[in-house]
Image: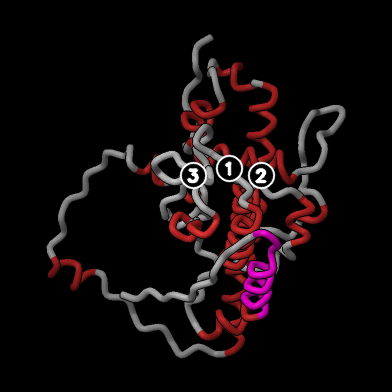
Amino acid sequence: MGKRTSRKTISDMFDNAENSQTENTETAAVPAEVIAETDVIAAAPLADGKSYTAHIRKINDALLAIKKSFFKIAYALEWIDATSAYEFDGYENIESFARDCFGIGRTSTYNYIHVARRFGTERDADTGEISSLKDPYRMYSPTQLIILYDSGLDDQQIEELGIDSTLTCAEIKNRIRGLSLMEDKPKNNNSDNGTPDNGITDSGAPDSGTGKTPDGKREPAGDKAHYARTNSLLTVTSLEDFDRQKNDILDLIRKTLSQDGFQCAVTISMSWN
């Protein structure tokens, strides 16, 4: 069955960098003096409270529309993948179907599908469609749900960590990092589906992971510090950020140091440009 003509109809805001790299467009250089003469924008009048409130409402309305669009696309792609309906257009997999028909890259395609399957309700008995999120996740943003999926946490762990939709993405990542250190629980490895890890990784320090020294000998209990794992637990970038997370920071340090049979040290470091 031959493929139909491409039906790329959605905005590039749902695409990712891998697609933009395939574009082969050329733009003519415009002299600076031409830009200076033609691109002059009149100064905006002084803002008043009413106008400010109206523009805030416009932004919130647009963000809500983007969120709703994400989930509509997620449910539709998930159904097409689950039913192999892409074969009607002659495609062999969801990746090529989403790319050719809608300009959605591989990573974004699987993000849509994983969010729908992990956090969506049961399929409709008649249509086989997932049409909404489970109650605990209805208020989450798409980005928050992608982070939670990549973490590999189950519903109980998410609840125990006190994660909810009111937390920022950075705060959610910080709590997940803390659990990763304390439990040494492997997270979902997405090398087979292209979804990003959203930065929820170890710091990259050497790790034998086997309780043995590099020469293969069993490491003495007192020497563990020489081969210990390190993990970035928290990131604080301002006093406001610290004030918002200080209770979580103290709680995380307390829990980490109180683990039975779990030797560790908490080091506070800083980075700057």
Residue displayed at 60% across by 84% down: 243
Q: Which residue is mark 1?
A: 111
Q: Amino acid at mark 3?
A: Lys
Q: Which residues are magenta?
A: 247-261
| 187 w.r.t. 54: above or below | above
Q: Is residue 87 magenta?
A: no
Q: Secondary structure at mark 2?
A: helix
Mark closer to the observer (3, 2): 3
Q: Nearer the viewer, residue 243 or 86?
A: 243
Residue displayed at 48% across by 57% down: 223
Q: Which mark is residue 115?
A: 2
Q: Nearer the viewer, residue 101 or 206?
A: 206
- How crowded is the residue under tag 2: few (<14 C-alpha within 10 Å), some, or many (20+)? many
Residue displayed at 71% across by 38% down: 117
Would you say the residues marked 2 and 1 are in contact, meaning their CB atoms lie under 8 Å apart? yes
Q: Which residue is mark 3?
A: 212
Quadrant hosting residue 113:
top right
Q: Quadrant of the C terminus?
A: bottom left
Residue displayed at 60% across by 47% down: 150
Q: Is residue 87 left or right of residue 35?
A: right
Q: Position of residue 12 (x, y in %)?
A: 46, 47
Q: Give the mark nearer the N terminus: 3 vs 2.
A: 2
Q: Is residue 139 left or right of residue 45?
A: right
Main secondary structure type of the part rendered in magenta: helix
Farthest residue to the right: give it: 125
